[in-house]
Amino acid sequence: MPETSVPSTMSCFVYRSKRNNEMYLYLPEREQFEKVPESLLKLVGDVEFSFEFILNTERKLLRYESTEVMRNLQDNGFFLQMPPNRYRSDSDGELGANLQGF
């Protein structure tokens, strides 16, 4: 299956998880949570709007490639930024169990 092309620029709305420090949910439209799976919303917990920015292919992001974020926003309708250490190592398997099926 051919890879879908991402637009050169897109709006991005970022919501901070109140439950999980440094976990952020990115959406392509403000308050549009319809495409986010219910089980993922439960994992993230309550969120609060943090900021909006224009994402483009040249923009440098701290942990992810901008094209990866843009592709997820376009294809899935959301992007989940995970906290840096706890979930990256996931030694207890908690994350894998919680994110199964995404």
Image (cartoon, rainbow, N blue to C red):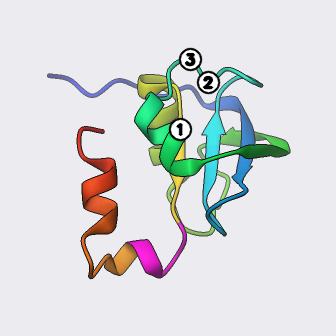
Residue 96 versus residue 9: which sits nearer the camera? 96
Asked if the residues shown at circle 1 and circle 3 are in contact, with their CB atoms under 8 angstroms apart, the answer is: no
User: Whole-percent x and y of residue 26?
Assistant: 63, 41
Is tag 1's residue or tag 2's residue first in the polypeptide sequence?
Answer: 2
Please give the name of the residue rendered at 31% of the width and 67% of the height, measured from the top-left corner.
94
Asked if the residues shown at circle 1 and circle 2 are in contact, with their CB atoms under 8 angstroms apart, the answer is: yes
Q: Secondary structure at mark 2?
A: loop
The local crowd at label 1, few if under 14, some if 14 to 19, many if 20 or more residues have their Cα within 10 Å, is some
In the image, which disc is placed on residue 41? 1
Q: Amino acid at mark 2?
A: Phe
Q: Secondary structure at mark 1?
A: helix
Q: Secondary structure at mark 3?
A: loop
> Distance between the Cα atoms at labels 3 and 2?
4 Å
User: Whole-percent x and y of residue 46?
Assistant: 69, 45
Snapshot quadrant of residue 8: top right
Was residue 39 drawn as part of the magenta stretch in this picture? no
Please give the name of the residue rendered at 24% of the width and 46% of the height, measured from the top-left corner.
100
The C terminus is located in which quarter?
top left
- For label 2, the residue is 33
Q: Amino acid at mark 3?
A: Glu
In the image, which disc is placed on residue 34? 3
Please give the name of the residue rendered at 56% of the width and 25% of the height, measured from the top-left corner.
7
Is tag 1's residue or tag 3's residue first in the polypeptide sequence?
Answer: 3
Residue 2 versus residue 49: which sits nearer the camera? 49
Which range is magenta? Answer: 83-87
Snapshot quadrant of residue 1: top left
In this rendering, the answer to whether 12 lies above or below 68 is above
User: Whole-percent x and y of residue 71?
Assistant: 45, 34
> Distance between the Cα atoms at labels 1 and 3?
10 Å
Residue 92 versus residue 5: which sits nearer the camera? 92
Please give the name of the residue rendered at 73% of the width and 57% of the height, measured from the top-left corner.
18
